[in-house]
Image: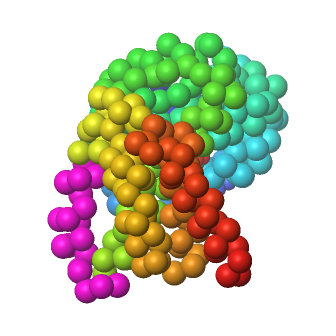
Amino acid sequence: MTHILIIGAGRLGSSLYRALQSIGYQKVTLAGREERKAETAPVYRFEPALAEKSDWLFLAVPDDQIKPLAEQLAGLDLTGRHVVHTSGFRSSADLEPAREAGAYIGSWHPVQTFSRRFLEPSVWRGITCSYEGDPQNVDFLREMCNRLDCRLQTVTAAQKQALHLAATIAANFTVALLSWAEQILTDRQIDRRQAAEFLLPMVNRVAENFRLKPGAEILTGPAKRGDLETLRGHLNLLPPEERELYRTLTDWIAHHLPTDKPQELRRFLKSITKQDGAEK
Ligand SMILES: NC(=O)c1ccc[n+]([C@@H]2O[C@H](COP(=O)([O-])OP(=O)(O)OC[C@H]3O[C@@H](n4cnc5c(N)ncnc54)[C@H](OP(=O)(O)O)[C@@H]3O)[C@@H](O)[C@H]2O)c1
């Protein structure tokens, strides 16, 4: 029976623990900095000796803790064991001390947002996990992903960094943009629930359109149409620091997506930049 040790009982580690239990892995241990009783599982204090009893180690700790933890594994005999971390940005190289101890190393990153501890196992359904590192880890991870109803995609270390950047822009900046849109409405006495009713059907439709077609084919709105006076009206509603963000995003559209009046749009954006610069 495969013994799995998850180090880091935070949002991802605890959700992975719950998911692995739900699909029938029977020897899964969750460990953290301190022993405690979490919602649904005991969390053991991590001691390097725990690692020697495990076939698989998942390091689900903050990125800057991966190397120090790997160094704690250096003096052990990990021959034939498997050590992966779950960071989106760091490569398997952070686990080099574990390789020197005899382990196969890798970085395995579920491209999903785990916003709470012990999330329900359905959070894994349909997602893609990237993997970079020693090939000896792939078969088990693929089997595990299949059982979790998600996919495994191998990538290079450079692709992995790009993937993390892209995921951060797509997920975290979406949260920032939605919060920005909500703030604009709540500042004008449209409450959070009403804001969601106005915005979310449209946002969901955008996501669905994007699933089917590239951004170039689904963009709508004033930048797409070249409605320059409407763009000016939007900018006038915003405080200076937010004008800059609106202008920068519109500039990105002007340079990367096809619009109906590209020359006029770019000229307009230049004139706004000059005007704002002169006012500073
Ligand atoms: N959350 C996500 O959406 C997500 C998605 C994909 C990948 N990841 C990756 O998963 C990793 C963990 O992220 P997270 O969001 O789950 O972080 P988190 O919620 O902050 O959890 C990190 C956990 O690691 C524990 N920890 C820190 N240092 C430790 C050490 N030296 N030994 C043992 N445990 C230690 C912390 O313990 P304490 O409770 O004692 O502080 C905490 O419970 C990161 O590499 C992140 O990039 C996260």
Front residue of this view, candidates 123 and 61 = 123
Picture coordinates of residue 97, whole percent (x, y):
80, 33
Picture coordinates of residue 160, whole percent (x, y):
62, 31
Magenta: main secondary structure equals: helix
Picture coordinates of residue 13, whole percent (x, y):
48, 47
Picture coordinates of residue 254, whole percent (x, y):
52, 47
Identify the residue shown where x is 51% and y is 51%.
Answer: 264
Corner quadrant of residue 55: top right
Identify the residue shown where x is 34% and y is 84%.
Answer: 187
Quarter of the image that includes the C terminus: bottom right
Front residue of this view, candidates 150 and 47 = 150
In the image, residue 19 above or below residue 243: above
Identify the residue shown where x is 34% and y is 71%.
Answer: 182
In the image, residue 42 above or below residue 156: below
* Scheme of image coloration: rainbow
Residue 189 magenta-drawn? yes
In the image, residue 247 above or below residue 53: below
Residue 13 magenta-drawn? no
Image mark count: 0
What are the residue bounds of the magenta stretch?
A: 187-204
Identify the residue shown where x is 50% and y is 52%.
Answer: 265
Quarter of the image that includes the N terminus: top left
Res. 115 visible in picture:
no
Corner quadrant of residue 213: top left
Res. 150 visible in picture:
yes
Corner quadrant of residue 158: top right
Front residue of this view, candidates 40 and 145 = 145
